[in-house]
Image (cartoon, rainbow, N blue to C red):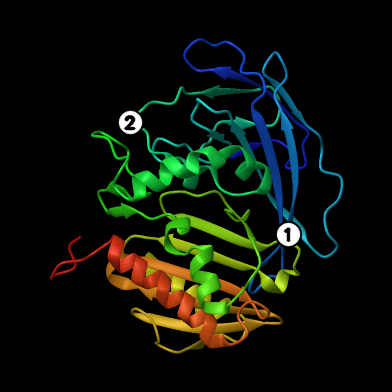
Amino acid sequence: MVSGDLRGPFTGKVLDAATRTPVAGALVYAAWTFERGSGLPAAAGFHEYVGSTDSTGGYNVPQLQDVPAGARLTDFQLLVYKRGFVAYRSDRRFADLGPRLDFAQRQQQVLLERWRDDFSHARHLRYVGGGAAVAALTGWEADLAAAEMSGQGVRPGSLGTDLTITTGRGPYLVAAQLLTDTDIKAQTKFDGSFETGPLGDEPDTASYSSQHWKALSRPETWDVALRIWRLDGTAATDRYEELLGSLPSAEEKGEIATRSLRAIEGDIRGIAFLDAPRGIVVLITCGRSQCASPDDAVALAKKIHDRILGLWPITTGGTP
């Protein structure tokens, strides 16, 4: 959560959590995200800033100057990355993936935890996210992450490569787990690249998570966005009913899970479904250029539901 003006400027100091000494030369990556539309809100691009900490560990992210015409600013996120440390995100903690609520616009103190051998590089890369500048500095972790995923680098006590966190109500599902750029490209035959990260509508919590696939050097009609709600009791059904009543041209189809619908607004296709036994509601939006047919969007939604079923099996009687 950001305390202050989303436009910035943002200032702070990065310190070693153990010694409280400055961490110089750390990557400081900032991103503002934009959205347009009301019925089927569509991602409207982003603006990024790339910098580094100075000799005192200080950073200064300048104020955002322009918002795209017809769009609204929805979020600001800051990432601090330095080899040898666990990365810092202004919106989420690494330890439990829960929302970070103590990030401030000015004079923020960022404490970087030293990397431990029992941490997972695969999990860390998923937590860090995408971006060209970020990828350039995290490339060294890719081989280590690949070894973990193949079972060659997993150590006893590791946090593991999965983003699933067990809670009393079943696993903590993160949107980034449920769909990948490889899944999208396999379905739509897209041959470009994506910038990925959470949407800017609201921070991830135990009950909400999002992910945005921004097609680089392409119009917004090539973008894909995913939102997932995880709710108790009848709240999931109520949320689905809200989508059914508010999404433009929404029509219930019953193609996925307990209930599902199709919607469309301009160049944006939307698919939503309710998995009642798990209390999960999913909304995926896909631009016409990426999802040339409504069936493409449906196929991606079915892929997401298949992942949910695998991550959260339910025995007879609905008990996880």
Q: How crowded is mark 1: few (under 14 residues within 10 Å), some or many (20 or more)?
A: many
At x 58%, y 77%, the residue is 189
In the image, residue 81 above or below residue 297? above
Q: In which quarter of the image is residue 105?
A: top right
Q: Picture coordinates of residue 291 (x, y %)?
A: 60, 80
User: For the residue labelled by badge 2, is the local secondary structure a helix, a strand or a loop?
Assistant: loop
Q: Picture coordinates of residue 50 (x, y %)?
A: 74, 38
Asked whether the beta carbons under mark 2 and mark 1 sit within 8 Å of each other, the answer is: no
Quick one: quadrant of the C terminus?
bottom left
Q: Which mark is residue 45?
A: 1
In the image: residue 13, left or right of residue 258: right
Quick one: quadrant of the N terminus?
top right
At x 45%, y 69%, the residue is 282
Residue nearest the viewer, comparing 47 with 280: 47
In the image: residue 270, left or right of residue 279: right
- Give the residue at mark 2: 118
At x 47%, y 14%, the residue is 18
In the image, residue 116 above or below residue 39? above
Please, what is the three-letter code of the amino acid marked with disc 1? Gly
Q: Earlier in the sequence, mark 2 or mark 1?
A: 1
Q: Can residue 228 be seen in this view?
A: yes
Q: Picture coordinates of residue 71 (x, y %)?
A: 78, 62
User: For the residue labelled by badge 1, is the local secondary structure a helix, a strand or a loop?
Assistant: strand
In the image, residue 37 above or below residue 254? above
